[in-house]
Amino acid sequence: MTNVKNVFIVGVGGQGIILAGKVFSAGLVGAGYDVKMSEVHGMSQRGGNVTTQVRFGDKVYSPIIGKGEAHLILALEKMEALRWAEYLKPDGKIVLNDFAVPSAPILSGKAIYPENIVDSFKGKTDILIVKANDIAEELGNLKVTNMVMVGAMIKALDLSHIDWDEIIRREVKEKFIDINILALKRGMEAI
Amino acid sequence: MKELMTGNEAVARGAWEAGVTVASAYPGTPSTEILENIAHYQEIYGEWAPNEKVALEVAIGGSIAGARSLASMKHVGLNVAADPLFTNAYTGIRGGLVIITADDPGMHSSQNEQDNRNYAKFAKIPMLEPSDSQEAKDFFIEAIKISEEFDTPVILRMTTRVCHSKGLVELGERELIPIKEYKKEINKYVATPANAKVMRVKLEERLKNLAEYSERTPLNRVEWGDKKIGIIISGVSYQYAKEVFGDKASYFKLGFSYPLPLDKIKAFASEVEELYVVEELDPFIEEQLKAAGIQCIGKEKIPLIGELNPAIIAQSLTGEIKSSIDCDMDNVVPRPPTMCSGCPHRGLFYVLGKKSRDIIITGDIGCYTLASADPLRAMDTCICMGASISAGHGVQKAFEKNNVDKKVFAVIGDSTFFHSGITGLMNIVYNKGNATTIILDNRITGMTGHQENPGTGYTLKGEKTNMIDIAKLCEGIGVKKIKTINPLNLEETAEAIEEAMDVTEPMVIIAKWPCALKRLWPEEKELYGNTRSKLYVNEDRCSGCKACIRTGCPSIAFINGKAHIDDSMCVGCAVCQQVCRFGAIQRQGGEGQ
């Protein structure tokens, strides 16, 4: 159990978190790990927050993790990183997409999007910042933001040896394979 | 071969391997994907039933015919199906019958967190509780066998985390099970009082036999570790406890959790120093142990409310709290779900909300329950499937009898109307009520992720079928005033609601427009599919009055005193344009685009 790694992927409905979790866990299964993952959806298509938890190692029991147990938080949105920060281990890492999606109370002018989120993490934890939306836009499709972030996470977790291109070929729709492979590579280079 | 599967996928796979040929369900989170996955297996007849009672009765019919059958539902669905459940326990089965209940501890997407393990005891039916995807598949197959061996329906009790988490599952082959030969057995399947009195005695005998089986089945096993702590546990909690204690505790792992193997538990209890029962929600196991004189610690330490996880179990039993990083989270803004851009419910509730001083809006279960939240706040009640119409009728009669001058609008979705709204509407017609029913016909079961229903013209397997016409159905019941409107047209919507304000007879308004996320069938594309161009805000004209913001559209933001429409999200529904008094919201490329 001691070698089990806990990853918490957080973001907003529509950011492709479910696919990110699927590709990531398929790679881990292929590499021979025992894997469990848990998703919370249901309201996700309606602008709510979305989380996927992935645990992998020799033998995994629980599909979910508790507060203070995540080795890595992959945040596709900045405020979501803050919302779930208490799940991070004191010596964990945050891989963060420097991108904000305002929620309904912010859109309607009733609340303010928190300032200086990135700075607030500095000195408290190991934080790696990726401008994944910019990279995805450069590549010509904002939808691959998720795969840029998966790329960065793979690098941060030292899992680059797995044949991720092959996994993408298996898990992603044919016409989007090439751009996803590219996005993953750019994500790995980004940190 | 091993495959990463959700618990729901694994149950479907288990059904296929076990030779099931009849499966019926009504969608409900977290159970929905069971039937969606069954749909992929050609050997199984699978269907969406209009509600859970129908689904269970279909499965009972399949079983009496001699075929292995299943019905699946979310926890509150079993309340709807409770009537056939209790008597099916008396009659027993012919082909194996498994009833899957998917409970939702923590209420991720439910109106309550009832613990359906109580149904097993209440109805005197055996119950299995898988703790992960592999067990979800294996236990389904075991459940079918137990059903046939003991002539009883069996409950397979899942929870959200078992349904929706993924784990590796070893796949097997399908067992070819021929249908059992049909025999007429009036004494067994006709539950008249005379027959039922005989069945009632047999039911208790069966329960005794099942208790003996519970003692010997490998589904209930002891895992010895350190004997200072003994933990009695079932379902996903087992995985959590293993995570926390590893081999620093001994476990009594209950896979077959009703009836309990009390002798085996007693023996286990005598070997350990401290005995804990770790269970989510009710003290279901704990109370039975205490009644049997087995001393244990349960709900004094383990929370009664909400979901468990490893951290909660660790904190409850050892006091250990894991530290994290120190972050200031006070500024984090909630991210509540909202109706989508282009949602056809928005226009309807915007108009209805304007009348909130003069009306009561009784609501129902579906995406439209979001209308109760800011900024629309256009809903007064939501109780259970179908209650909008029947409770609305009760409100109206109470007001009438006590001279309160308020109009009642009952608002219900198309799928929910078919589920259990029709009977409420019949009650209004029969008892001369005048509550107006608004049926939000978005051409799909939206909330649970787009399942077909009797009004959509397609089956679970995507085959074309008879389409029930809601207007004609209402007419057939005896409603004389029926109006079909496009809820994205606010003028048309307001007119219908104004008309309803003065009506003194039952009236139905059908607000018909497909869900903004629905993948339209070819024939629907002709009706609803002409894509309109997006809208934008002409800032010179925007007065900053926030009228458009009050529609609650997630595409509109208020930035520096002006409204702003997010181009990537707008679908051009134009509800915002209709509420703007300054003509500031315009269509890209001009009107008519």
Image (tube, coloured by chain):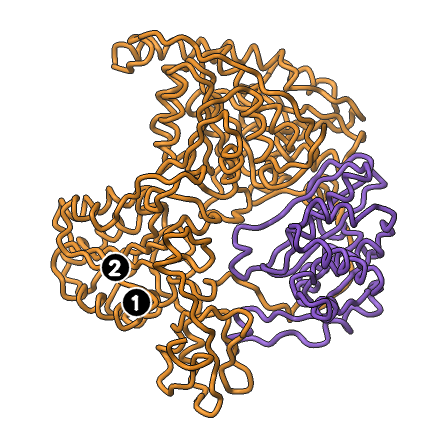
Q: Are marks 2 and 1 on the same chain?
A: yes
Q: Which residue is mark 2?
A: B409
Q: Is residue B215 left or right of residue B53?
A: right
Q: Residue at x 50, y 25 (%)?
A: B43
Q: Colour of chain B?
A: orange
Asked which secondary structure carries label 2, the reply is strand
Q: Nearer the viewer, residue B469 or B186?
A: B469
Q: Which residue is mark 1?
A: B352
Q: Is residue B1 above or below residue B447?
A: above
Asked which secondary structure carries label 1, the reply is helix
Chain at numbered mark 1: B
Q: Amino acid at mark 2?
A: Phe
Q: Is residue B467 left or right of residue B322?
A: left
Q: Colour of chain A?
A: purple
Residue B226 position, x and y percent, is 81, 26
C-beta proximity under 8 Å, tags 2 and 1: yes
Q: Nearer the viewer, residue B461 or B515?
A: B461
> Which of the two discs, 2 and 1, labels the residue nearer the N terminus?
1
Q: Is residue B382 left or right of residue B436?
A: right
